[in-house]
Image (cartoon, rainbow, N blue to C red):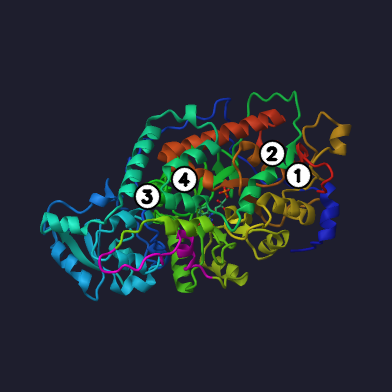
Amino acid sequence: MSGFSPLRAVLNLRTGTGSKASFISRRKLSNQASSTSTRRIDQRLAVGAGVALAVPTYLYYTRAKLDYQPNTTPDRVDDHVPAQPLSAKGNGGKEVSRVTSRQVLDKKDSDEYWVVINGEVYNVTDFLEEHPGGPEIIQNNRSKDVSYIFNPRHPSDQLNKENLPPSVKHLGQLEISDESEKEELKLKISKSESDEKERIENLRKEYQDKDLSNIILNMRDFEKAAEELCPKVGWAYYASAADDEITKEENNTDYKKLRFRPRVLRSVREVDASTKILGYDSTLPLYISPAAMAKLGHPDGEVNLTKGAASAGIIQGISSFASCSPEEIVAARAPNQPLFFQLYINSKRHIAKGVVEKINKLGFNAILLTVDAPVGGKRERDIRAKGEFEAPKSDTYDKQGDTKGVAEAIFSAVDPDLSWKDLKWLKEQTDLPIIIKGIQTVEDAVQAYKYGADGVILSNHGGRQLDTTQTGISTLLEIRKHAPFLLRPECRVPMGPSKELIENPDLLTPSKPLNEKPLDRKFSIFVDGGIWRGTDAVKAICLGADAVGVGRGFLFAQTVAGVKGVEHAIKIFESEIQLTMRLLGATKIEDLRPSMVDFADPQREQ
Ligand SMILES: Cc1cc2nc3c(=O)[nH]c(=O)nc-3n(C[C@H](O)[C@H](O)[C@H](O)COP(=O)(O)O)c2cc1C
């Protein structure tokens, strides 16, 4: 990075020239939020049961599978055991192996561990120790139909032949010999759990039928509704953050320490909040942050987000630990819909290589490489929730309580030895833009630029990793102070009143600083964490962010009402962002500049 001096950079805050990142193809949006179609979705309900969790198999096995199979999650998972013996001729006319319920039940007292999932029988004896959720949950439920536990946590194509771990043996279709055996195969679900499941099912139906615009006015309303609609384990996983959850809280309260400086009489009838994110059109400077396990909140999971993002024209980031597979998500994608894939690098590099190959092949548009989670943070709600669950007890194996929290299970596959040199390795595997997610200091933002990343996400993982770490918006302030050269030139100016504007109040914003060069190559800066309002998003954009990410808010929205919930959430953000812009005197994203914001505490140094 030629000629960078932090001192010079600080001094140059006020001056400089350069071209702004291009914002083209704006879509004019009128006073009304753009209309988004609402889509009815399947009302199937997944209720959290147990904390067994397998890291999606595509992280281990790499053959890309492009033929999407529809979700086969049964309506009532506990009743999944088929009523009728299955035909011996399924599978496109080929002979299928059949396994009787008696055979499955007899394995209870053997050395082998068999389970039934969605009407198929598997021998998982050799998989026990590989199961990222720990062997106990399988041992506890041997010789049972475990679809109820399995389905909300795994992509529906995870058990397809090409995705099946070699240590899992598919034995054939289940054939029920008689009613009593069918009963014996069923998981025993406690009364309280089945009551809870019913309550959630009814409540979700109500939300699906209601006009959300009358009851969900802001993103916090979604949070409240989601708490009622999420099974305990899912809620604990979504809401949890590290230790005392101080960073999670500050992620939002830090925005409250900034004040707007609106300009008036600026003719704001027409406003356009559209922008480009990594060159892709977006109706808002806001995207869906990648967050794992959307099926814990709603049976259709991440696909809800894909469809909602498509109809409203924003971009979705997809977690490495999504509960829908990349193939399912790509199959749900609208033509030319941009999708960014969030990557965790597996300790086994050949596995990571395979994942990247798959992402390239499936046509994702960018990689968000998460670096703030070499190990999982201490998320106590999540850890506690596993204890609260009444795990179905097996007749033959009653060791309880040793299953992992969802987060703990997930992180067992992530490489804790990842280092900057691995970025070079990743660049060799892909031509996609690489954005480093989880940058928490100005030093690392500079390092990411030096190592050739295409951008950074200033993020502390929603406060889920190191508690009391600084917030994304604080890191942006650090960059403004110590490495403003990373920002677009027009944002390398101070917050608050500007001498130039006082001398020439006709101007809405200060002119681009003279003598400030743009970077040699494009470098995007995104911020996430604690964005609950349009005002939060606009503050970050004013200070130099290219766009902001929202994690929990969208998880909650899809939990409450699937695709319809996601569309409604985007509408909320759209109308709040447009309103904020109008009240600031800004009619397009380029108008949003540091002079429109200042610290609430006037003593605070920039
Ligand atoms: C339940 C949950 C799961 C998450 N899973 C991932 C993940 O798999 N990968 C990742 O990079 N970030 C993950 N994140 C972090 C988000 O991408 C994002 O940084 C964070 O949610 C932003 O904060 P917010 O929830 O306050 O909007 C997750 C966050 C939550 C709440």
Residue that mark 2 sits on: 590
Q: Could you say whether the residue bearing mark 4 is in a helix, strand or loop?
A: loop
The residue stretch that appears in magenta: 394-415
Kindly report the distance in space between the C-alpha atoms of the residues bearing marks 1 and 3.
40 Å
Instruction: Read off the residue under disc 3.
Output: 331
Is residue 468 among the parts visible in the rendering? yes
Overall secondary structure of the magenta stretch? loop
Q: Secondary structure at mark 2?
A: helix
Q: CA distance from mark 3 to mark 2?
A: 35 Å
Q: Is residue 373 left or right of residue 147?
A: right
Residue count near mark 3 (Cα–Cα under 10 Å), binned few <14, some 14–19, many ≥20:
some
Determine contact: label 1, label 2, CB under 8 Å.
Answer: yes
| Residue with the mark numbered 1 | 490
SS under mark 1: helix
Which label number is shown at residue 337? 4
Mark 4 and mark 3 in contact (Cβ < 8 Å)? no
Identify residue type, mark 3: Ala
Look at the picture and state if 61 lies above or below 437.
Answer: below
